[in-house]
C-alpha cells in the first residue's frame, strides 16, 4: 500500500481541546536503512510491525506495510530495537474531511510537536487549522526513524 501524507510543525496547543482521541505510543526500529525501515510500535495496548519503503523525491509518498501483533510480541521486539526508542502521545483531530494526527514527543525529542495528515492523492485539498505551522514534508530530520538516531534535543 502507498501512504501519502504531509507533515507540519505545530505552533500552539489548541489542537488538544479539539482532539477526539489520545494514545500513548512507544516505538523502536529494527532497521533504519535509507531504502527501508522496520518499525515496532506499541500503541496503547496493541502492537504493530511496520515496514516502510524509501520516500518519493518530494517526501509525500512511500510504500507502507503494517501488521498487528500482540502486546507481548511488541514488547519483546522493542527490546531488540536499535538505540533511540521514541515515546510520544498522539492526538487525533478531525478537521473537515481529514484526520490529523498530532504527535507530542517526549524524552530525547521533548519539545517537538508534529502534525500529519494522510491524503488519497498528493494534490488533495485539505483544511488547515490555525495551530498548523511550517510544512516539513520531505525533510528527513522529522522522520521518526531519523529522530531515533538524531533526537531533537541534539539539534543546534
Image (tube, grey):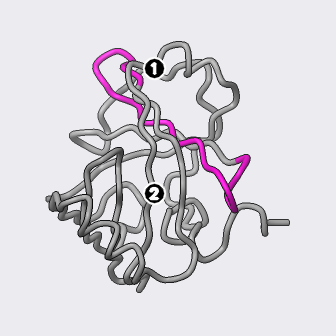
**The residue positioned farthest toward the front in the image shown:** 72
The structure residue drawn at horizontal position 61% and vertical position 49%, both measured from the top left corner, is 105
**Place of residue 93 in the rendered image (x, y in percent of width and height, measured from the top left):** 41, 23
Q: Which contiguous range is marked in magenta?
A: 93-111
Q: Residue at x 36, y 68 (%)?
A: 55
Residue at position x 77%, y 62% in the image: 153
Residue occupied by mark 1 = 19
Q: Position of residue 29 (x, y in %)?
A: 42, 75
Mark earlier in primary sequence (2, 1) = 1
Residue at 62 percent across and 23 percent down: it is 131
2, above or below 79, in the image: above
Q: CA distance from mark 2 to mark 1?
A: 20 Å
Q: Quadrant of residue 125?
A: top left
**Residue 72 image offset from top left, x and y in percent:** 25, 65
Residue 152 vs residue 142, the one in the foreground? 152
Instruction: Say the numbered circle drawn on residue 26.
Output: 2
Q: Secondary structure at mark 2?
A: strand
Q: Secondary structure at mark 1?
A: loop
**Nearer to us: label 2 or label 1:** 2
Instruction: Judge whether 130 appears above or below 72 on screen.
Output: above
Q: Residues within 10 Å of mark 2 (few under 14, many from 20)?
A: some
Above/below status of 54 relative to 72: below
Amino acid at each position: 500500500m502507498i501512504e501519502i501524507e504531509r507533515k507540519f510543525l505545530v505552533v500552539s496547543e489548541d489542537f488538544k481541546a479539539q482532539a477526539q482521541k489520545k494514545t500513548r505510543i512507544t516505538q523502536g526500529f529494527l532497521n533504519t536503512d535509507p531504502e527501508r525501515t522496520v518499525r515496532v510500535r506499541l500503541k496503547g495496548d496493541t502492537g504493530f510491525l511496520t515496514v516502510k519503503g524509501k520516500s518519493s523525491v518530494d517526501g509525500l509518498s512511500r510504500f507502507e506495510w503494517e501488521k498487528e501483533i500482540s502486546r507481548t510480541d511488541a514488547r519483546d521486539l522493542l527490546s531488540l530495537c536499535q538505540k533511540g526508542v521514541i515515546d510520544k502521545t498522539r492526538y487525533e483531530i478531525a478537521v473537515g474531511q481529514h484526520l490529523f494526527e498530532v504527535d507530542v514527543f517526549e524524552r530525547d525529542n521533548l519539545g517537538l510537536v508534529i502534525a500529519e495528515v494522510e491524503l488519497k492523492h498528493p494534490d488533495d485539498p485539505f483544511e488547515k487549522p490555525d495551530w498548523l505551522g511550517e510544512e516539513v514534508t520531505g525533510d528527513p530530520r522529522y522522520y521518526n526513524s531519523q529522530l531515533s538516531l538524531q533526537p531533537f534535543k541534539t539539534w543546534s
